[in-house]
Image: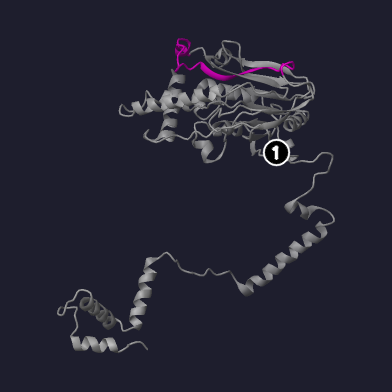
Amino acid sequence: MRTSHAVLLLTALILCVFSGCGSEGISTQYGSSKGFSGRSSVNGFTAMRGAYVKAGFQDRDVTRLSNRIRKIDTIVWTPVYLSPISGPVTNWMESWLAQGNRTLVYIVPDSGSEADYWRQARPGAAPSERLEYRRRYAKALNQQQRWQLNRSSITSNGWFDLKPKLQDSVARDLIAEGRGQGDSDASNAESSESDESSVRLEWIIQPHDSNTGNQTGSTAYSGFSIGPTGPNAPSWGGYVELQESNTEVDFDSEITNADSDSIVAKITSTNWPNSRILVVAGGSLLTNFAMTRPSNRQLLGTLISQSSPTQTDPIAGFCNAPGDLPISETSNTVEKSAGMELLTVYPISLVTVHAALLGLIACLMMLPIFGRAKKIDRGSQNDFGDHLDAVAQLMRKNGGAQFAHRQISDYMVRVRGETVGSWVMPESLHKTQIIESPRK
């Protein structure tokens, strides 16, 4: 019962944060692990990143591959949409894994958790809003099915094969490891949409079959599916330079479902000492909303425990770019210093360091003379009160109250045709003041 209560509590908290009163939509941006979108989206990965930090990892952002990224112990890759991993990226990753004690966590993008959110939130909604929740759940479910129809098998880079297949099953291995002896309600759970042990898989991870792909070491251009295949996938495909790896790898299923399909697969090679690639079958297993389920939190704990376990102060890099990551490094060359690092490079440091010290001394010498910089109030051009003040100054220069009285009287006589009244001057005085100019 404790597990069920914890799930309901976490689900209620997320409902309050994401949906408010239930009348507004929710954020569904996929792949981000930081910032507002990563925190507020049901498809974000901020909770997963926070779990790595809580486990002792230092987190970094990976937007391109460079020599500095080689110092990172674990790379958590959550592509915003699925596309083949390019040949240059494959070669870089394998050289990084060959350093030893490295872990690449590759999370296959899927439809996300939007449909699951509306399905689980519908029973707890107010009676007046349940119809709207049901409509949004049906809309998200239809969108999810359209994405699945646009998918096709992704051409492999030589590590593993991916095939689209939608199924709801039970992750027996994972639930067996995370279930305690006292969870009597979990053992009596029914196999339904709301079952805790139910796992939705949209991709099947299989060992790579070289007979169905490119020849080892060959280069080809592989296009990915036409039409969107996920929340942030483009509406049309493109081409990625694909070079199948010639590294011999071993494929092991770490976590499987009732149909023996891999939920988490581990890929190792003798060329990668104590390094590994962990492939997760779907991002919906590790999103912010997915963390409301104890089985998914158990899955995340398994990934963290296998991510560079021998490192004392491990560093985890988080990347959400597609398969064709930019690479910014040159081979067989010495890494050059840039920016402020030039101050420490000999012999330039003999000049730059002394120049910086002289500049600092000059600033300290001039500080008592010039003092602190003053801020000048230049006013605002959007203040309507300034307009009134300007009109009042013009009227004062032209006679003040008498000028205003004369203008009103002139308006009453010429426009409205009045000859008497509190605002109409005598005709003789009126003509006299019009001819006279009070301006100086």
State left or right for residue 36 relative to residue 274: left
Give coordinates of residue 259: x percent, y percent.
58, 10
- For the point 31% across and 84% down, the residue is 399
In this orientation, which residue lies closer to the viewer: 412 or 369?
412
- For the point 29% across and 88% down, the residue is 435
In this orientation, which residue lies closer to the viewer: 2 or 302?
302
Q: Which residues are magenta?
A: 183-212
Query: Which image quadrant is residue 225 in?
Result: top right
Coloring scheme used: one colour
Give coordinates of residue 341: x percent, y percent.
75, 51
State left or right for residue 45 relative to residue 355: left
In this orientation, which residue lies closer to the viewer: 205 or 365?
205
Residue 211 vertical placement versus 416 (above, below): above
Residue 47 inside the magenta-drawn segment: no
Give coordinates of residue 134: x percent, y percent.
38, 25
Locate the N terminus and report the quarter of the image it occupies: top left
State left or right for residue 415 relative to residue 181: left
Secondary structure of residue under mark 1 = loop
- For the point 47% across and 28% down, the residue is 114
Residue 202 inside the magenta-drawn segment: yes
Give coordinates of residue 404: x percent, y percent.
27, 79
Crowding around mark 1 (Cα neighbors within 10 Å: few <14, some 14 to 19, many 20+) is some
- For the point 65% across and 38% down, the residue is 60
In this orientation, which residue lies closer to the viewer: 287 or 231?
231
State left or right for residue 410 relative to residue 420: right
Locate the C terminus and report the quarter of the image it occupies: bottom left
Q: How many numbered marks are there?
A: 1
Q: Which residue is mark 1?
A: 326
Which residue reaches farthest left?
A: 420
Name the amino acid, label 1: Pro
Q: Can I make out residue 406 in this image? A: yes
Q: Can I make out residue 116 in this image? A: no
